[in-house]
Amino acid sequence: MIRHSLVSTAIITALSSFSAHAAVVTGQVLDDKNQPISQAEVHVHGKAQTIKTDNNGQFSINIDANSQLHISKDNYVDARIAVNEASPALQVTLIPTSVETVVVYASALHKNSLEMISPVSVLSGDELRNKAKPTLGETLKGLPGVNASYFGPVSSSPIIRGLDGPRVKITQNGLDSSDASRIGPDHATSNDSLAAEQIEVLRGPATLLYGSGAIGGVVNVVDNRIPTDNIEQLTGAVEYSHDTVSNANTYAAKLETGHNNFNFHFDGTKRTGDDYQTPRFNLPEEEHEDHEGHDEEEHETATSVKNTFIDSQTVNFGTSYVGEHLTLGVSYGRIETDYGIPAHSHEHGHEHEHEHAHEEGEEEAVYARVEQDRWQGLMSYALHNNWIETINLRLGYTDYRHAEIEDGAIGTIFSNETTEARFNVEHKLGNWHGMAGYHFSESNYDADGEEAFTPASKTTTNALFILEEQQFGDVTVELGARLEDYNIDSNVDTSAHDHDHEHEEHADEHGNELTAYSKSFTNLSASAGAIWQYTPGQSVSLSVSHSERAPLSAELLSNGVHIATGTYELGLGYVIEDGEIHFEPENIKQETSTNIDFGFRRFSGDFGYTVNFFYNDIENFYYQQNTGLIFDEEHGLETAEPGHDDGMAVYQFVSKDAKLYGIEFDAHYQLNANAMVKLFGDSTTAKLADDEGNLPRIPANKLGSELQYTISDWQFSLTGTHYFEQNDITAYETATDGYTLFDAQANYQLTVGPVDTQFYINIDNITDELGFVHSSFIKDQAPLPGRNFRLGVRGYF
């Protein structure tokens, strides 16, 4: 009640404040040749007010005392100019750049990609549409510092600087995606890159705004499902594409319109595809007995990965009211997807009901059926006030269900019901501009079935955060902090396991002993950073952050067979003594990360680059360690012995200190008005402290180059990426050979009446190279797709 009263008081006080425009500032925007720039955006920093320059590059705008103007135009470096009521007519010169500047919505302070202190990459426009794949991991894996977990092309999550799972926060318009992809690599993310307007990748800790789980980074999928600008006329887009490697067909459509400040949005996608083709590869060797009792090895090959089909459809509706001060909106989205889970099968004696099932008598395929309903709401009030600028509230409710279908029936159901609210006030206090707010999240996770290796749990977080920035000449300083209360509640099956006196014991309907378990953590995160624009178009940045993270239920309470990965998983709360498993969740410590980021950037002229160095020292790093034991239903836990492969390897989450460090870079050179060449790459080293070895499944280093060429209405590109051998491995891991992928693309622009049309052809893996992804749990069973021709057409009106 106290918290609600304080929030209400703040809102009432803000709304009763008067609007104060102190003066009118005029000026002209010019390029480096002293020519006027028309249609440049002039924005009062921290305000909703934006105007555009006229044909002579001139503008006139209302400001408060001691304001800052943000002036931007495509293909130019943004300018920020301090002004006050006594400022004379301005003359602003913008420096050309060959890199597009894009506003990063995840920054929360209206920063563009060149102004960010933390490294960021943004995919948008035609570049995003050309690179979009069914999963986020495959869409983003070519970016420096980003790789993919790759559980086949239909389930692939982003890995940022060697960190994945719960350490990479995946959001949609700033709110958690709320699926089950953080529980296991076979669970696909529910975010649809095909319908996104923009995808932002923030590398390094982003815990201040997005929660303690974002130690590795944030992937924010931005869409326009709640329009925040008034739409004056009917606009839309349609697209069709075909992929030969999996016989996949993709259809997408979008419509938007508006009238009298009311706006409406619709988008939908449909994708179907069969098992994908690969270069010929050796299947994992299996030992069999011949008729005389001798062991013999069977060597089988394959040219496709079975059970990798996809059948997906999404539909989204949104509406909003956008007034001078107030914006209100709501959206609803529905996802229905069936997709095969490779290397996840059981023996059955009759045919599966699904059309992609195998024939009678063969090993029965298991597939996933994902259904998600997602509601989002937005309220924003711009006060144009001297100290409170905007009040924002985002609400989200997600009902997610992931069912694994076997033998025509539901085997295991994973569900996640999430409610989330983010309230913040953007303000200006003296020379500091920033944001303070409150973040609430409640997630009810459940799993029911023979593969429910993680018990049902309820996770609740309440957090306060603040983020402030101030400019000192050419240096912008940013400070932030977050205080988070994190609580997890669950009933844990402790049959035949030890427990302590803190846990309340009872039994379920099957007679299993259940322990009521509850654990709370207080996570404190803080950061400090600065960026120095030491010359126009060039900067150097430095940031230091401290982040604390509590374990997810899967990391803490897992206890069971995870067939998708072929392992038996145990959480941090269990210990193994004399071949028995005991539940003893004492002394669970938070994962604590201290991260240093140091970067150089150049965006002016024909030559530009971004180079980032990072060092991440993590105490109590949670990861799965092979115990050297195996589990089978008949004998339970046993020591693994050579030639004994009847059981599943036992992996347990452990907590040890670790260090991750490396470099990522992206450079470009404009050869002439038509051609540009790019060079990109990354390297990550991830080791346990005290020379205890390497962390498992760390992605291989990569180095790539891209040539872009434009002539008339044609656009061409050729990209080559080499993934190096990965031999920095742990016990029970195998090294992965390097490989090189070449991709080509051609686009043709054509105007047909009122419709702008684009025809395109992409050729992926031109040389049909055989490549295995080291970070994949099933790398030997699911190599990368072979040569693929993707043909498509887009239309805009």
Image (cartoon, rainbow, N blue to C red):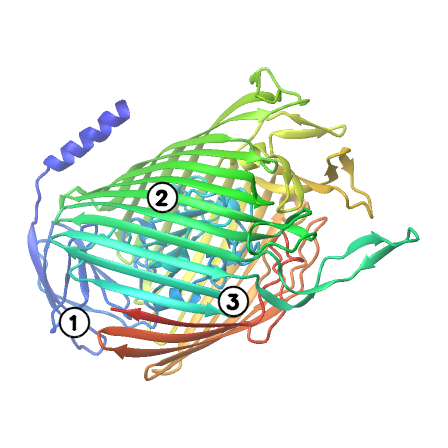
Residue 423, compared with residue 541, is above or below; it is: above
Which residue corresponds to the image point at 30% horizontal and 79% vertical from the top-left?
A: 750
Amino acid type, callout 2: Arg
Foreground pick, 31 / 382 = 382
Which residue matches tag 3? 247
Amino acid type, callout 3: Asn
| Residue 328 locus on image (x, y percent) | 20, 44
Foreground pick, 33 / 88 = 33
Relative horizontal placement of residue 550, taking residue 87 as reference (left or right):
right
The numbered dot on residue 374 is 2
| Residue 326 locus on image (x, y percent) | 15, 45
Quadrant location of the C terminus in the rendered image: bottom left
Marked residue nearer the N-terminal end (2 or 3)? 3
Amino acid type, callout 1: Ser
Q: Residues within 10 Å of mark 3 (few under 14, many from 20)?
A: some
Which residue matches tag 1? 38
